[in-house]
Image (cartoon, grey):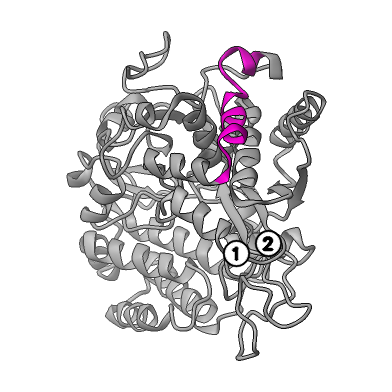
Amino acid sequence: MADAPVPGVHPVERRRILPPYSLGSLEDYADIGGGRGLEAARSMGPERTIEFVVRSGLRGRGGAGFPTGAKWGSVARAGGARHYAVCNAAEGEPGTFKDRALLRAIPYAVLEGLLIAAEAVGASETYLALKASFAPETEAVSRALVEIEKAGWLGDLTVSLVAGPEEYLFGEEKALLEVIEGNDPLPRWLPPYVHGLFATAPQLGWEASVPGSDGAAGLEANPTLVNNAETLAHTAWILAHGAGEFRELGTESSAGTLICTVVGDVRRSGVLEVPMGTPLQSVLDACGGAHPGREVRAVFSGVSNAVLSAADLDTPLTHEAMTAAGSGLGSAGFVVYDDTACMVEVASTLSRFLHVESCGQCPPCKLGTGAITAALDTIRDGSGSNRDLDRIEESLRIVTDGNRCYLPVEELSLVSSVLRTFPGDFAAHIDGSCPVGGRKIPPPKILDIADGIASYDPNQERKRPDWTYSE
C-alpha cells in the first residue's frame, strides 16, 4: 500500500526516508523500523541482497541515475583482496540540500544503508565523507555512529568519518577518494570500481595487471563502491519494507521517491520528498510557486544540466522524462528564476562557478570555462558584441576535450542551453540594454535552509580560480 501523507506535509509529498522532524536517538529510529534492513541483509547474504536491490529498480539519487543494484554487483564481482564502501555526503551541487537534510534528520538511515552496502560488496572498511563546514551534520552523524556501535550494529565493520574541503569537486566520486587518502580533490582518470581506495595497481598504462584482479605481485585495484547519502538511505528502506513496496511509488523506469530541493524565486525554499514522476510544477507549487505578480521563467537542475523554460514545468521528475525535455534530473536540486532575472546574468554567474571550481588538470576545461565566463561578463556589462558570442561557441566546442570528470560537460550543457533558450536576452545586451533590469544573481551554493528561507555562501563570490579567496 502506498504511503499516506504525513499530517502537516504538503499533499504532493510522500515521506519514506525523510521524516518531518529530526529523530533524537537510535531508539526513535528503531521505533519506525530502523535496523530491519541491516538485519535482512545479513540474513540473506550478499548475492540475495544485491538481487533485492536490483528488483527494487533503485537508481542513484544524483548524477545520471545509474542502477544501484548493478553498481553494487560490479564491485562485488570485481575481485581483488580488498573492497571498500563509501558514502558521498560532500554535497556541493548548487541548489541542493537533500543529503544534509537527511544527515540532520535521520543519520541512522544513511549509516544503516552504508553498512548494508558494505555487507553486499564484501567491504570490511567504510567511509562517510562530508565537508568540514557541515557542522550540524557532522555532529548528528558522530552521535549516531556512537549509538550504532554501542548497539552492536557494526559487527566487524569500521566506519570512518572524513571531513573534507569546500571545493565542488570534493563531491566528484574519483576526487572524493583522493580526499579520503589525504590528497586534494583532483579527479582520477579511472572510476572507483576500477581503481579504488588505497590502490597500488597503476591507473593507466600497459603493465601486466588487470584492474580488479590480483594482477602482478603486490598490485591491488581495491574496487570501491561510492553512493550518496540519499541512495544509501533508500537501500535501508528497501531492505526493511520490500522491493515491491518500493516500486508502488514512481514509474517503471524511475521507481520510488525522490528528495527535491527548491530555492530561488519561490515563496518558500524547501526540501521535500515526492514520488518520482511528480511534475516539476507540483513541486514548485508545494513551495508556494512564484512570488506574487511574478512568473517562473527558468529552472536549473543544479549546474549539471540544461535549463528548463516555463514551457517545461509540467515535465515529470523521472530520468527519462527530464532527458526527453533536453535536461537531466541530477540531484533534484532546483534553482528557480522568475521574470525579473536576466539570463545573461544567470549564465555568467553559473559559468563563473564552474570556472572557479575547475581543478585545472585538463587545460581545455580550465581555459575554456574561463574564456566563456569572460565573454559572458563582457556581454552582461554592456560592452559585448557578436564576436563574444562567437568566442563562447568556439570555447564550447573544445571545453570537454580530454576531460577526466563531468564539470566541462556541465559547462557545455548549461551555457549552450541558455544561449539557445533565451537568445533575446543576449541580443538586447549586445544592443546596449538589459531587458529586465539586470538584478545581481548570486551563486546558489546553499549554506542552510530554515523557515522557508535559503541562505547562500557569500564566500563563493570571493573565490578565485586557484581556490584561494580575495579579501
Q: Distance between the residues labelled 1 and 2?
A: 8 Å
Residue named by callout 1:
192
Magenta-span inclusion, residue 393: no
- Magenta region, residue range: 28-46
Which residue is at a point 68% across and 51% down the rendered structure image?
A: 123
| Residue 271 image offset from top left, x and y in percent | 47, 30
Residue type at tag 2: Leu
- Quadrant (top left/top right/bottom left/bottom right) for the C terminus: bottom right
Marks 1 and 2: CB-CB under 8 Å?
Answer: yes
**Which secondary structure class fits the magenta region best?**
helix
**SS at circle 2:** helix
Q: Is residue 404 visible?
A: yes
For the residue pair 327 and 196, the one nearer the viewer reads as 196
Residue type at tag 1: Pro
Which label number is shown at residue 415? none
Relative horizontal placement of residue 123, taking residue 248 as reference (left or right): right
Choose mark 1 or mark 2, whichever is in front: 1
Which residue is at a point 42% across and 26% down the rendered structure image?
A: 268
Relative horizontal placement of residue 71, taking residue 133 as reference (left or right): left
Residue named by callout 2:
177
Q: In which quarter of the image is residue 42?
A: top right
- Quadrant (top left/top right/bottom left/bottom right) for the N terminus: top left
Q: Mark 2 or mark 1, which is nearer the start of the sequence? A: 2
Does residue 417 sit above or below 61 in this rendering?
A: below
| Residue 259 image offset from top left, x and y in percent | 44, 34
